[in-house]
Amino acid sequence: MSIYAIGDIQGCYNDLMALLDHIHFNEQYDQLWFAGDLVNRGPNNLQTVRFIKGLGEKAVVVLGNHDLHLLAMAAGCRTPKKTDTFQDILDAEDADEILTWLRYRPILHHDATLGYTLIHAGLVPQWDLDLALSCAREFEAAIRGPRYRDFFKEMYGNEPAVWSHSLSGHERLRFIVNCLTRMRFCDENGRMNIKETGPPGSQPAPYLPWFSISKRASLDMKIICGHWSTLSYYAANGVFALDTGCVWGRGLTALKIDTIPTRITIPCSGR
């Protein structure tokens, strides 16, 4: 059995199929880990999600910010953006089934045997594995519960920017989701700067890439993430970043993780 982690697909179904063909993916034996953002901005969102959902236990999926945006739209808590391309999912005859399946995906996955943790974006420096797992489970319980629409109404926004154990309610959940699905930069105290989206070095002081914080509590972890297309592939300090800009016509990346980490990137057609 081979296990591959794959970066942001964003509805680029044909590119995903090309990557799986390239790595000789065997649906019977192999497993795929998806680092979030299955959907949006690309051309074939419905095909993408139907395929991944159809893999059953052979697919491990964590939610990304675009996946959550789709769920908020479907819940009637957000109006569409000009760049949104997932109307095919909302119009599908199996839309309710797909959206329920997506809402029950985790926001963090940890495999104790392999020693890898899968997230979409990042971890603030105060969070070790135990705290990250605990916060992720809080969020997952909220969006799987009967009042999940209440949170989606309050999900959008960049505050609070700093973690505190005393955070509660929607503010606490918003911080958790921003950290795990939107963050790129923060400062030494963990203050997030959500607005900056450029590559490392483009950010103002005192912000740094979240994985460059020297005393972060997650230094002993092996973390797989996506989200940051302007960073592209990154492998250092126990972090493997896999968003190589598929939807922008650059590349789609898989990382073989059941042995010595091996990167495979194919060129993409993009949107």
Image (tube, rainbow, N blue to C red):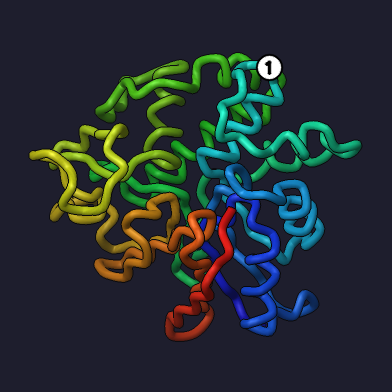
Residue closest to the eye, 25 or 114 = 25
Residue 160 lies, in percent from the top left, at 31, 21
Would you place residue 138 above or below residue 8 in this image?
above
Would you place residue 209 above or below residue 70 in this image?
below
* Residue drawn 62% across the image and 16% down it: 77
The total number of labels drawn is: 1
Q: Secondary structure at mark 1?
A: loop
On screen, residue 28 versus residue 171, left or right, reads right
Would you place residue 203 above or below residue 261 in this image?
above
In the rendered image, which quarter is residue 147 located in? top right
Residue 5 lies, in percent from the top left, at 54, 67
Q: Amino acid at mark 1?
A: Gly
In the rendered image, which quarter is residue 146 located in? top right
Residue 17 lies, in percent from the top left, at 70, 69
On screen, residue 104 versus residue 178, left or right, reads right
* Residue drawn 69% across the image and 21% down it: 75
Residue closest to the eye, 253 or 125 = 253
Q: Is residue 222 visible?
A: no
* Residue drawn 60% across the image and 14% down it: 150
Q: Is residue 43 visible?
A: yes
Which part of the image, by quadrant, shows the N terminus?
A: bottom right
Would you place residue 155 above or below residue 202 in this image?
above
Residue closest to the eye, 155 or 215 = 155
Residue 223 lies, in percent from the top left, at 39, 61
Q: Residues within 10 Å of mark 1 (few under 14, many from 20)?
A: few
- Residue at the extreme right: 93
In the rendered image, which quarter is residue 28 located in? bottom right
* Residue drawn 82% across the image and 36% down it: 95
On screen, residue 159 versus residue 66, left or right, reads left
User: Which residue, given by chain and number where applicable, does mark 1 sit on?
Assistant: 76
